[in-house]
Amino acid sequence: MIRVFKFGGALLKDVRGIRQMASIVHEFKCEPLVVVVSAVGKTTNALENLLSLARKNQTTALQQAYFALKGEHVRLIRSLELKDERTLLHQIEEDFYSLWQMLEKLPKNSFSAYDSVVSFGELFSGKIAAFWLKEKQFPVKLTDARQLIATDENFTQANVNWAYTKKIIDARLVSELHRGNIVLTQGFIAAGHKGHITTLGREGSDFSAAVLAYALQADEVCIWKDVPGLMNCDPRVFSDAVKLPHVSYNEAIELAFYGASVIHPKTLQPLQKIGVPLKVCAFYAPETSPTLIDAGEENDADIPKIILKEHQTLLSISSRDLSFMAEENLKTVFSAFSRHKIHINLMQNSAVSFSVCFDENPEKCEAVIESLKDEFVLKYNEGLQLLTVRHDDGKMLQKFTHHKQIFLSQKNRTTQQVLMRPVKE
């Protein structure tokens, strides 16, 4: 029985988390097991900041941020009290030196530069996790994800070459698993057909686990989280959040599409194709029953699900000559959003205007406005909230839109969405 486990970086940020990861792995070490890890803590955010500072030539701030991030990893390693701490510190030192060289000479392609810089987070965490497991006598084999998952070179959102990836994984992982080794690899990162580093999109480590499971025809995927399982809403925002014991692939894909943060939007699709169940497991209470995601749809409407996305921008686009916002105009708009890699969370069309909602990003917003301003009249609002309610019991939407200014709303048979802002007293 082949299992694929994925551990998020928030779980591996300290000694307690790394020890708990090892404890969970220990329970399954006698069976074929692939472990996928993310960058520890907020490393990806920190690397994005380094990239931004490097682009702006803010040398002093860049050096400070660089040494702060390096210090965090050094402190984590030292807190593990490893017998061969010096070897691991030397490896991490070499990686940080390579990172600094990258920051000093960024690739001309800004998206390629992004992937090259942020990939270091997973390289750090993979080495730390593997080193810890090896020192605890686990039969672990660290395998670079860039030598496993092959993609195109659509940087920051690379598309997997499924056929080639399966051939690579069959050749490199199956024999290791048959020898009784635990394969540990990194999430989020891959390599393009020209050898350049690529990434699978933010929170793409879940997707990495699904790619590996698909290629290996695994029996199950377990995503370990710091929550009891898949919740009907974010427990950090809603005090009455409840656990979902079971949802279907389709329901989970819908929740991911609308912005639920527990499962990456692309994760379920390869698993659904071959019927691999996904379990969302409680990291600090592994004995509790997980949320099971499989083909069964009988429980999907039992509990309302609520997704709230903060920091939303609404851009309203209308033609300058009041002509219809028909196919040709929409083609221009969608092309601009695609070119600047902006994901649209909600859209609405009328005769002479087209409104889109997307995550706030000043640089991308400015770029798309610049590309459309000559042809269209543009108006935008920032600081909005996008509320999505699936399978409403008749009370949820009314409860959460009370005393809110509504900018846009949509409804179908299962889902209601409202773009809103709290009314100032």
Image (cartoon, grey):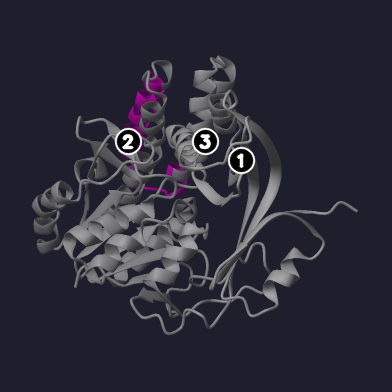
Q: Earlier in the sequence, mark 1 or mark 2?
A: 2
Give residue 45's position: percent from left, percent from top.
52, 39
Left/right placement of residue 251 relative to residue 200 reads: right
Give residue 359's position: percent from left, percent from top.
58, 44
Q: Amino acid at mark 2?
A: Asn
Say if residue 177 shows up in the picture.
yes
Q: Earlier in the sequence, mark 3 or mark 2?
A: 3
Disc 1, SS = loop
Residue 181, quarter of picture = bottom left
Q: Confirm or deny contact between disc 3 and disc 1 (CB under 8 A).
A: no
Q: Which mark is residue 360?
A: 1
Give residue 292's position: percent from left, percent from top.
39, 76
Q: Which residues are magenta?
A: 77-102
Which of these two is toward me, 236 or 273? 273
Q: Which residue is mark 2?
A: 154
Disc 3, SS = helix
Residue 60 included in the magenta stretch of the image: no
Characterize the local packing of mark 1: few (<14), some (14-19) or many (20 or more) Cα atoms within 10 angstroms: some
Residue at the limit of the structure toward the right, as seen here? 425
Q: CA distance from mark 3 to mark 2?
A: 23 Å
Count of numbered badges drawn on the protein: 3
Q: Which residue is mark 3?
A: 46
Classified by dominant secondary structure, the portion drawn in magenta counts as: helix
Q: CA distance from mark 3 to mark 1?
A: 19 Å
Q: Earlier in the sequence, mark 3 or mark 1?
A: 3
Q: Amino acid at mark 1?
A: Glu
* Residue 367 vertical position relative to residue 245 in the rendered view, above or below: above
Q: Amino acid at mark 3?
A: Ala
Characterize the local packing of mark 3: few (<14), some (14-19) or many (20 or more) Cα atoms within 10 angstroms: some
